[in-house]
Amino acid sequence: MPTMRNHSRFSAHFKRMVKATLTVSMLALTSISAHAITLEQLQTKLSSEPLVRGDFSQQREMAMFDQPLISSGQFLLSAKKGLWWHQTAPMPVSLILTQDKLSQQFDNQPAQVLAASDNPMVFYFSHVFLSLFKGDTSQLTEQFDLSLKTLKDSKTHEQWQLVLTPKTAPLNKVFSKISIEGGQFINKLELDEIRGDTTLITFSQQTTTPTTLTSEEKRVFQF
């Protein structure tokens, strides 16, 4: 049977453990708070590189289909030129979006080119998504309520999540919310639609080199 002295020692030791645990927890919370990223910092982080290349995988869940629609390919985001979305599976599709033009080509068919004046609504949505990829929070605040939080604090890159809730039509008639997660780059983009459909795009192998467009990439944006 433990003596009163042993009981007192155990009680004191237990109190020290509790105090130490609380101290560590408070320090951890303080560290996270001190390193919490702001919208301005996020925009600076995502727009600091002139070119970003990488791979993508897209999974779209639709109520009318039993199985998800899955596609994959590569992307190129140029601060000056725009976005090249090059799907390679399950079939080749090339989508190029610039400030005032949109080109879409299926397999070896002739490309379909639209100007902003041809279909203003298509370009409205296209420019919203271009702002998403660029992390242009100053533009996004016009259409969305933004909620940004730090998910993980590391020595390399903060992991963050940005949730966008549409404020006005037509976006709030289509999407319930859009979630973006990343670190140095955007790693995941999830689109939740009002009707229940969802699209999840994951990005990998992102790189900022080479820092200039190749000959083929220059040709892609010439249309």
Image (cartoon, rainbow, N blue to C red):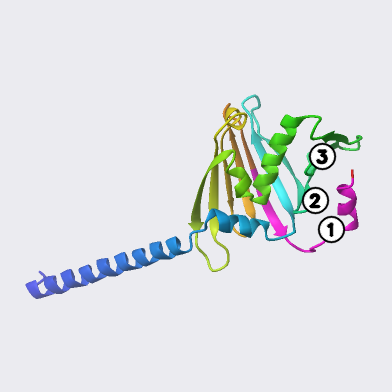
From the image, tell me which residue sits under label 1.
213
Callout 3 crowding tier (Cα within 10 Å): few <14, some 14–19, many ≥20: some
Q: Residue at x 88, y 53 (%)?
A: 218
Q: Earlier in the sequence, mark 1 or mark 3?
A: 3
Q: Of helix, strand and loop, which one carries label 1? A: loop
Q: Is residue 25 magenta?
A: no
Q: Position of residue 69 (x, y in %)?
A: 69, 35
From the viewer's perspective, is residue 89 above or below residue 207? Answer: above
From the viewer's perspective, is residue 159 above or below residue 196? Answer: below
Q: Residue at x 60, y 29 (%)?
A: 169
Which sits in the foreground, 95 or 1?
Answer: 95
Residue type beneath disc 1: Leu
Q: Residue at x 49, y 55 (%)?
A: 151
Q: Are marks 1 and 3 in contact (CB under 8 Å)?
A: no
Q: Of helix, strand and loop, which one carries label 3? A: strand
Quarter that holds the C terminus: top right
Between disc 1 and disc 2, the foreground one is: 2
From the viewer's perspective, is residue 4 above or below residue 114? Answer: below
Q: Of helix, strand and loop, which one carries label 2? A: loop
Q: Are marks 1 and 2 in contact (CB under 8 Å)?
A: yes
Residue 160 figure quarter: bottom right
Which sits in the foreground, 90 or 145?
Answer: 145
From the image, tell me which residue sits under label 3.
101
Residue type beneath disc 3: Lys
From the image, tell me which residue sits under label 2.
81
Which sits in the foreground, 15 or 50?
Answer: 50
Rendered image: mark on residue 159: none
Q: Position of residue 44 (x, y in %)?
A: 62, 58
Q: CA distance from mark 2 to mark 3?
A: 11 Å
Residue type beneath disc 2: Lys
Q: CA distance from mark 1 to mark 2?
A: 10 Å
The boundaries of the magenta stretch are 201-222
